[in-house]
Every structure is written in structure tokens, then in C-alpha cells.
């Protein structure tokens, strides 16, 4: 997958880089090249996602319609930077009833448009899903809108948590009312174990107090 991305990006970016080495709008070659390098390098928009790097435990609740009883599933995920920090590569493995399902997500930050651009693929369909969105400086959330279905809105809640964060997906029903269709909870394996150990200690102390 990474090799394919490298080839695709090289094909377009090298042509653009070649173009930027000629005068553009009266700019000298050196200035044009400096501007190109500025927009092509990782920026603060990329650094905002540094907290995601590493391994996570996943849990999800989801439903297709507001009337459905929520279902649950569990999995694992790992994030890593590729192409010198320009794109965030994520692999997810869901533990389903009879098999494992895998998903890959590529997240980029477009310096020119100030937008996050995300590509999803998985092993349960042949569809490539694309979403775009922006960071909300007030709530510190990352809000994404599906490119094909504008009724699907995903919110990465408060994207500064190093050990824990939530991702919510909203859809609209037949009446146009928005409902919470999926909640993803990410938690660091070590942090989850710490919480479990603390819960066990609390339970033990309560039992000791009763005796």
C-alpha cells in the first residue's frame, strides 16, 4: 500500500516541482521553489496529529437507524507517519464474530486549503471512502464530512488526549434528523491496564472495609 502511494504521489508531485522551478507570476526561480517547499513540507496541521502515533485498543457501538439496538465490537489500531511525516497511516483490525476485519485509513493535511483529507479502504468492500474536514480551534475537535454523502459527519472529539479519545459519527435518518450512528473509543493499552488495576484495587479496598 505504501509503495502504491509513493508512486502516485511522486508522479504528481515531481511534475509540480518541475513546474515550480520556472518563473511563476513574475517570481524568481529561487522564490518560487522556496514557496513550493513551504507548502509541501509537514506543518502544524500535521503536528496536531502526533498524539495518535502508536498502538490503541478500540471499542465501538454502532447502529444503522435510530431505532436499532446498538451493537458492540472491539479491535486494535496503530498509527504511524509515512512519507517523511506528510501522511498518517492507520491500520485497524476488528474482532468480529467469525473473522477479523481490516481497515486502512490515510490522513493528510493540505497546507494550501487548510483541510484534512482522509481516505478509507477495508477488506469487506471494494469502495474507497473519502472525507474532508477542518480543526475547530474552540472545541479542539476535528470535524469531517463524507465527500460522497454529505449527511455523514464524523467528529474526533478533543484531539489532544494522549491516552484516550472518542470519535463520533453522525448520520441523518429519512426525516433528515441527525442521530449518533457510531462511537469509537480509543484507549492506550497501558492506560487501559492501569485503569483496570485501579478498579481492582478499589474493589478490594471496599471488600476489606466491609469485613
Image (tube, rainbow, N blue to C red):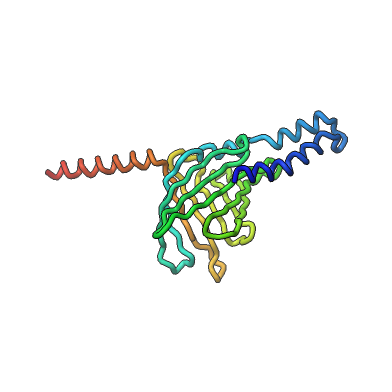
Residue 52 position in % (x across, y down): 51, 40
Quadrant in the rendering for residue 43: top right
Decide which of 147, 105 is in the foreground and name it: 105
Q: Residue 113 occupies which quadrant of the picture? A: top right
Residue 5: x %, y % from top left: 64, 44
On the image, the x and y values in percent for residue 80 come to 53, 39
Question: How many marks do you count on the picture?
Answer: 0
Left or right: 70, with 200 as reference point: right
Quarter the C terminus occupies: top left
Q: Nearer the viewer, residue 78 or 174?
A: 78
Rendered residue at 64%/57% (across/down): 147
Residue appearing at x 41%, y 53% in the figure: 74
| Of 27 and 76, the residue lying toward us | 76
Q: Farthest bottom residue? A: 175
Q: Residue furthest left?
A: 211
**Residue 192 in the image: x percent, y percent?**
36, 42
Residue positioned 54% across, 49% down in the render: 104
Q: Is residue 70 left or right of residue 128?
A: left
Write the residue at 43% across / 50% down. 75
Kindly give the residue lying farthest to the right in the view shown.
26
157 relative to 169, above or below: above
Amino acid at each position: 500500500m505504501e509503495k502504491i502511494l509513493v508512486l502516485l504521489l511522486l508522479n504528481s508531485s515531481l511534475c509540480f516541482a518541475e513546474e515550480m522551478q520556472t518563473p511563476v507570476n513574475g517570481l524568481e526561480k529561487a522564490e518560487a521553489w522556496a514557496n513550493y517547499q513551504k507548502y509541501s513540507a509537514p506543518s502544524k496541521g500535521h503536528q496536531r496529529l502526533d498524539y495518535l502515533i502508536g498502538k490503541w485498543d478500540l471499542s465501538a457501538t454502532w447502529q444503522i437507524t435510530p431505532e436499532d439496538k446498538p451493537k458492540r465490537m472491539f479491535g486494535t489500531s496503530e498509527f504511524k507517519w509515512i512519507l517523511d511525516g506528510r501522511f498518517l497511516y492507520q491500520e485497524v483490525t476488528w474482532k468480529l464474530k467469525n473473522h477479523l476485519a481490516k481497515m486502512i485509513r490515510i490522513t493528510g493535511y493540505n497546507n494550501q486549503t487548510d483541510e484534512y483529507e482522509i481516505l478509507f479502504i477495508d477488506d469487506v468492500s471494494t469502495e474507497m471512502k473519502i472525507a474532508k474536514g477542518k480543526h475547530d480551534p474552540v472545541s479542539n475537535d476535528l470535524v469531517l464530512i463524507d465527500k460522497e454523502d454529505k449527511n455523514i459527519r464524523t467528529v474526533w472529539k478533543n484531539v489532544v488526549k494522549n491516552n484516550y479519545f472518542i470519535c463520533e459519527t453522525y448520520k441523518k435518518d429519512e426525516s433528515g434528523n441527525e442521530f449518533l450512528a457510531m462511537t469509537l473509543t480509543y484507549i492506550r493499552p497501558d492506560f487501559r491496564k492501569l485503569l483496570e488495576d485501579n478498579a481492582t484495587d478499589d474493589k478490594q479496598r471496599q471488600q476489606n472495609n466491609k469485613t
